[in-house]
Structures are given as C-alpha cells and as structure tokens.
Image (cartoon, grey):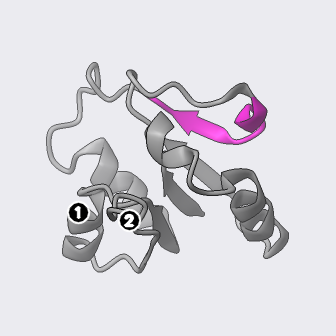
Amino acid sequence: YVLVAYPNPLESKKIDLEKILNDIKNLGFEIIIKSRTKNSVSPKFKNYFIIDDFSNCMSVFPSASEELLSISSFLLNFGSCFVEEAIFRNCPVLNFDVKKNE
C-alpha cells in the first residue's frame, strides 16, 4: 500500500496528483487516500480507497493514522505535518513541498 495525505485544494492546484497516483498504481501499489472531512477528495479519485473522517474513530492508540502507516510501504505527502507521524513510525516518505513560497 501507499498512503496518500490528500492535499488541500490550494496545494492540489500545484501538482498533477492524478498522474502521480497513476504512476504509483502502475508500479503495482494499492493506494489509500487519507483526507480530512473539510478537504473532500475529488470524484476523479473515486476508484481508490478513501478514508476521509477520523473524528468518529474509536481507536486511541494506535491511532487510525498510525495503523495506516504501519501497513504502508511509504507515505506520499504534500507538506502536511503527517510527515512527522510517518517518521515516528519509520515509514518512508516522499514529500512534495507544495507549501513553499513561490
């Protein structure tokens, strides 16, 4: 699996997420998209496994995010602080620094 920290709408305009996900899929990985409820996942990604609301999750420790990281080969991140959780879990990270000032 590859866990994708879905970027917010402003950041998603800076990248071609569809191409990135297609390339990862073509390498044989299954993709899990983790989003926040306020950042709805685009309908064009409906064929991927999407998790978009952890607020009702009963898991306290390990958290749902930690459990997803534990089954993932790596995290695809777009400048979110989720990278810190991945590092803590020894999960490799591919980070696109889309928050960088232009």
Please give the label number shown on residue 85. 1
The amino acid type, in three-letter code, at marker 1 is: Glu
Residue beneath disc 2: 70
Q: In this view of the protein, can residue 19 be seen by the observer?
A: yes
Please give the label number shown on residue 18. none
Q: Position of residue 31 (x, y in %)?
A: 65, 55
Image position of 54 (left or right of 39): left
- Assign a secondary structure to mark 2: helix
Q: Specify the quadrant of the image occupied by residue 95.
A: bottom left
Q: Position of residue 82 (x, y in %)?
A: 28, 57
Image position of 37 (left or right of 40): left
| Mark pair 2, 1: CA separation | 11 Å
Q: Earlier in the sequence, mark 2 or mark 1?
A: 2
101 or 49, which lies in front? 101
Residue segment shown in magenta: 44-52
Q: Is residue 68 above or below residue 37?
A: below
Q: Is residue 50 magenta?
A: yes
Q: In this view of the protein, can residue 7 be seen by the observer?
A: no
Q: Residues within 10 Å of mark 1 (few under 14, many from 20)?
A: few
Instruction: Report the residue that reaches farthest toward the left.
Output: 60
Instruction: Report the residue that reaches farthest toward the front.
Output: 102
Q: Residues within 10 Å of mark 2 (few under 14, many from 20)?
A: some
Instruction: Report the residue that reaches farthest toward the right.
Output: 26
Q: Is residue 56 above or below residue 99?
A: above
Discs 2, 1 touching: Cβ within 8 Å:
no
Q: Is residue 61 magenta?
A: no
Q: Position of residue 25 (x, y in %)?
A: 78, 64
6 or 32, which lies in front? 6
Which residue is pictured at 31% across the width and 55% down the height? 80
Image position of 60 (left or right of 45): left
Q: Specify the quadrant of the image occupied by residue 91.
A: bottom left
